[in-house]
Each structure stands twice: as structure tokens, then as C-alpha cells.
Image: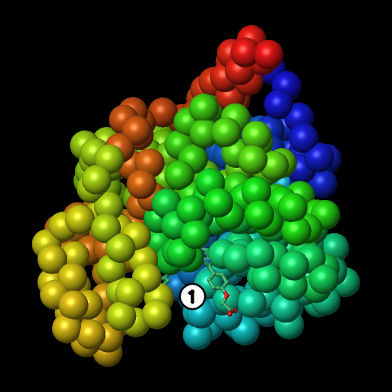
Amino acid sequence: MALKTALCEILNIKYPIIQGGMAWTSTAELAAAVSEGGGIGIIGAGGMPPDVLQKEIDKAKTLTKKPFGVNLMLMNPQIDEQLEVLKGEQVSLVTTGAGNPGKYLAEFKDRETKVIPVVPSVAMAIRAERQGAVAVIAEGTEAGGHIGELTTMCLVPQISQAVDIPVIAAGGIGNGRAIAATLALGAKGVQIGTRFIVSTECTVHQKVKDTLIKARDRDTIVTGRSTGHPVRVIRNKLTKELEQLDSENKAEELEKRSTGTLRKAMQEGDVQWGSLMAGQVAGIVNEIKPAADILKELVAEAEETIKEIQGYV
Ligand code: TUI
């Protein structure tokens, strides 16, 4: 198996596959398993108290000697304390989401930590390149969690044209065919979240994995548009209430109602009253496997697809 791109050299990894950093979902166990399997695993630090983040980094270092990363959710009120933790660590990669990482980029560069921001638009990709990002993640609205407006199909080629640094496609990628498709759009790698939730090593509640296996193509919904921070989640009893609040433009009440619900779903297994953040690919995820097997399957299918398409010319 090959599937080598420029991203593999930049991050010192076998396959150009980044595991999406998912708050309350991608802990040290999953991150280390993805890194051991040849991709790069990411600890989702969103909402993690700084001392817990420290413990997760320590744990990942005992589980793998391969490079792994940390995802910072920039809207997190404890971001400065989390940055203090990262100062004491040689983490090879930081991905960022839900904001502009500009003011942190110089500091990470001094410490040889590579920063790859998630960007929802061409303008933000150009800004990130100018600020020193080593690559950008172009995340389409098919993704789970906090999302932008453009689809992966439209975002990836436009960002690929606009910047010289590698573009990593995210949102809507759950199998090898989708990997091949995004490489055709100009991406040099992919970020995958939802597929890795349904892995043996992911520490979310079993009910979350069962729900994703059962989910079909139209089972996700976007809530919170009225707050300016839309999030894609699996439809449930909570989203019925949130839909109502959204339609009445009751943003403040919606924010209040949503607080703590991601943890409630992912860790406590309350799949009816929690926010089960997942992407539109939930419908094609139907089997729990070790992360290393998922990676092998993804790469093999991407290669087969590329060969199939080569036959057309
Ligand atoms: O960040 C994500 N996905 C997330 S974060 C999260 S935690 C959360 N919980 C409740 C409400 C909101 C978030 C769950 N899922 N993906 C990366 C991502 N970043 N998607 C979109 C963006 C983004 C949006 C705006 C990046 C930059 C940006 O810039 C705005 C600006 O003007 O700086």
C-alpha cells in the first residue's frame, strides 16, 4: 500500500490521514491507536480542564512513540490555561477549530509545533498561510460538530487553488472512495472524525457507537443556527426542542439548553438528551473495528478507487 503525499513527509506519517480532534470523544486511547496505525491521532482538548489535558498527553506518550496531536477549540474559555500545558510538551501537531489561531502561530513555530487550522473559507485559508500554518484543513458543512456553510466539494478545490500549502479535506469522508474523491479535488490528505468514533479504541459510551451504526443518511440535523454557532448532531429528543428554540430565534435559551450536552451524550451515553455530534457520513458507518484496521481499509479502498478511475482514460 502506498497513498503517499506531501503531507506524509510534513507530519512524518505513513498515510495522509488525520483523525479529527473531537471534544469529549477523541481521548489518548483513540489518538494513540490512530498514530500506531499509520495516520496521526489527535486528542480533542475542547472542554478539557488543563490538568486532564496534561494527563491525556502523558497517557498518549505511554501508548505510542509515534507523532500525535492536540486539537484546540478556540472558543473555549480555558484556552490560555490549555496553552500553558502545551508549552511544557513537545507535541508535534496542533489543529485548531472554531476561530482564528493567528495570535498563537508564532509561539508554536518557536517550539517547532506544527499548526494546522480548520478553515471554513478561502479568505481564512489565505490568512492562515500568511500567518505560518504548515497546512490547512478545509472542512465542509457535511462534518459533525461546529460547521461552516460550504460543502467539501466546493470548498476543497477553491482553497486548493488559493494557497500553496497542502490542503486537507474534511467533512463527509467516511470511506476510501471519498478519500480518492478529495485527492481529485486537490487535497493532499484527509481528516476523518465520525468513522473513528465507531472504533474499538474510542472511549465514548457504547450507546453512541450503537446509535451511529444504526444511523441512516438523513439522521443528522444542524441546530443552533440562531446562535451563530451551528452544530451538526444526530437527531433526537434534544434536537426537537432545539429546533423549536431556533425557529423562535431564542438564541440565549438555546445556548443554555445546550451547555454540557456533548459530554452527556459522548461520555454518559444519553443519546436522547445529549448532543451526539456526528457528520453526514454516519449513514455509511456500520461496524466497530480497531483504528488500525479502519485505516488499512480506508487506504485499500482509496487505492482501488484510483485504479478503477485510471481505467477510464
Ligand atoms: O471546531 C470544529 N468542530 C467542533 S468544535 C465543537 S465544541 C462546540 N460545542 C458547542 C458549540 C460550538 C462548539 C464541536 N465541533 N470544527 C472546526 C471548524 N472550525 N469548523 C468551522 C470552524 C471555523 C469557524 C470560524 C474556523 C474558523 C472560524 O473563524 C471565524 C473567525 O472569523 O475567526
Q: Residue at x 16, y 57 (%)?
A: 236
The x and y percentages for residue 229 are 40, 75
Q: Position of residue 185 (x, y in %)?
A: 64, 40
Q: Nearer the viewer, residue 27 or 225?
A: 225
Identify which residue, 202 or 54, lies in the foreground: 202
Q: Is residue 187 visible?
A: yes
* Residue drawn where x is 38% and y is 50% of the image: 279
Tally of numbered tags: 1
Q: Is residue 89 above or below residue 176?
A: below
Image quadrant assignment for residue 214: top left
The structure's colour scheme is: rainbow
The part of the image, by quadrant, that contains residue 141 is bottom left
Q: In this figure, which residue is indicated by the disc labeled 1?
A: 49
Rendered location of residue 282, percent (x, y)? 33, 42
Q: Image quadrant for the C terminus?
A: top right
Q: Which residue is found at the position 60% from the left and 30% from the top?
A: 180
Q: Residue furthest right?
A: 110
The residue most toward the front is 313
Kind of residue at disc 1: Pro
Mark 1 neighbour class, 10 Å CA radius: few under 14, some 14 to 19, many 20 or more: few
**Above-or-below relation of 11 to 23:** above
Q: Is residue 97 above or below residue 246?
A: above
Q: Residue at x 82, y 71 (%)?
A: 130
Task: Tell me the SS state at disc 1.
Answer: loop
Residue 91 in view of the camera? no
Query: Residue 102's x, y, as percent?
Result: 72, 78
